[in-house]
Image: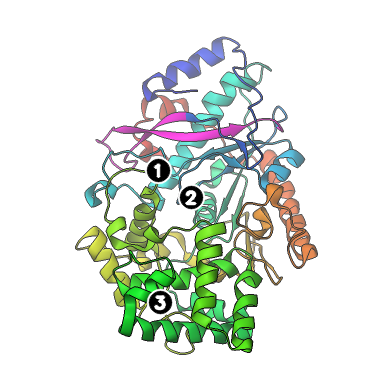
Amino acid sequence: MRVFTACTLLLLLLLLFLSSVESHRFHLPKSDGKYLTEDEQWLDQSIDHFSPIDHRQFKQRYYEFLDYYQVGGPIFLKICGESACLGIPNDYTAVLAKKFGAALVSLEHRYYGKSSPFDDLATNNLRYLSSKQALFDLAVFRQYYQLIVLQESINAKYNLSKAENPWFVFGVSYSGALSAWFRLKFPHLTCGSLASSAVVLAVYNFTAFDQQIGESAGAQCKAALQEITELVDEELQSDGGSVKALFGAAQLMNDVDFLYFLADAAVTAFQYGNPDVLCSPLVDAKTSGKNLVEAYSSYVKDYYLGIFGASVKTYDQQHLKNTTVSDASGDRLWWFQVCSEVAYFQVAPENDTVRSPRIDTQYHLNLCKNVFGEGIYPDVDMTNLYYGGSKIAGTRIVFTNGSQDPWRHASKQTSSPDLPSYIINCHNCGHGTDLRGCPQSPLNIEGNAENCSSPEAVHKVRQEVINHIDLWLSECKGSPNIQFGAPLGILGSRLQDHSNYQ
């Protein structure tokens, strides 16, 4: 395990120029296949990158995998998102790393998992939880890993003390947005980014989300889901306790929390590439005159809560108010980001809705107020002003989306100069299909595409991604305008004030 303090950073750099340092570890052990590595590494990170006087730090977890690395090759930064980062997943990025001779590194998002700056997650302590702070975390980590870790373990051993590796950034979903935003804000630190299912557009009333569910479901399945919604809404009025118990969700005292839970259960089938698991039994139940609500409850309990592994308490506002740091903290943390920055309020459309119309804007605002207190609301206009939304003006960012994924309507779905965008069209192509294959959960080792209804569609987009990575890495290496190393003064004397990075 490797731990560095900010105070020793300049000294280490000077020593690296004076002597050759043996590699402490070149190959990391593989896990059982789900992760390439689970071996934890650590660095000291600033709590507030934007304060010139606050020098407090916290321990941030990261991982590295060097089995495919060829000396002088690229570094692939796989960004972890809104959950604990338990290792580097063995998805399609592993295939890409092998192809390009790249090292794989992954940084856990601040506050999530073991990277919490505080022991208590009260609202006041969450003020440093934002995408902006997370982007500076990534920038500081990138410089730390390039100028300290690589120098210590590899470059110095091969007398490459002044060498700079080309970097490429990857992310899926929220971390896909971070990948795009990192290239936008720190173009000098990466050759390019893959933004898979990247939700770069903050949306206040995200009605397109529910509309995509209806479209992906098809006419028969959509009609069944709409009938279930109406029946459950009626049963909640007459015997709410019984219908909640039927779905294994008796603990949800708030009726709309329960309705949100039921809506999410259906969403999961389309978002993660398993539409037939949901629709086949529902269409069969409707055509044969069986009880639709009971058929849906079987799916929810057997698949959503069972095989998929969702938890009812995730939807309980009392659970979301728990400020204790634990394995379940991610629920509260992501809702804070939703309530303070990006919204994505998955509200029911006015017409032809699949989810209950009771899931409206006011429900979300009430949740934000109940869980986090007065004054917490998502200023999506400012978020989109800062990043550009779907009109993001960066370069060398490739966007990919699955045709059945409701989140694609918060992504960039049309190509523009230097920003290619691809839609993977197939019956079960959902969230992160290019990196995770089909279905996306549970994880498909090395992102196998053969379970997608159209493997050719996945392979075609993957080849486009490979072409862009290959081109941008080659252009990056030869461009005099790309400067990877930060000055010693920044990293040495001002590491604790990361706001110096421009």
In magenta segment, residue 386: no
Within-10-Å neighbours for mark 2: few <14, some 14–19, many 20+ = many
Nearest to N terminus: mark 1 or mark 2: 2
**CA distance separating discs 1 and 2:** 9 Å
Tally of numbered tags = 3
| Residue 414 visible in image | no
Mark 2 → mark 3, Cα distance in angstroms: 23 Å
Residue sitting nearer the eye, 184 or 179:
179
Which label number is shown at residue 81?
Answer: 2
Q: Which of the 4 image quadrants contains residue 72? A: top right
Can you give x and y, in whole percent of width and height, for residue 445 in the image?
69, 47
Of 12 and 86, which appears nearest the observer? 86
Q: Which residue is mark 3?
A: 347
Q: Which residues are magenta?
A: 42-68
Using residue 249 as the reference point, say whether residue 295 is left or right of it. right
Question: What kind of residue is marked 3?
Answer: Val
Look at the picture and state if 297 lies above or below 431. below
Q: Residue 110's mark? A: 1
Are the residues tagged 1 and 2 within 8 Å (C-beta)?
no
The residue shown at (21%, 63%) is 375
Question: What's the distance in space between the residues labelled 1 and 3, CA to CA?
Answer: 28 Å
Q: Residue at x 45, y 82 (%)?
A: 229
Residue 47 part of the magenta segment: yes
Residue 229 seen anywhere in this rendered image of the structure: yes
Q: Residues within 10 Å of mark 1 (few under 14, many from 20)?
A: many
Q: Residue furthest top?
A: 19
Percent coordinates x, y for residue 235 in the rendering = 37, 83
Left/right of residue 321 with respect to residue 499 in the rendered view: left
Residue at image location 63% in from the left, 43% down from the top: 34
In this rendering, the answer to whether 482 lies above or below 292 is: above
User: Could you tell me the amino acid type at mark 1?
Assistant: Arg
SS under mark 2: loop
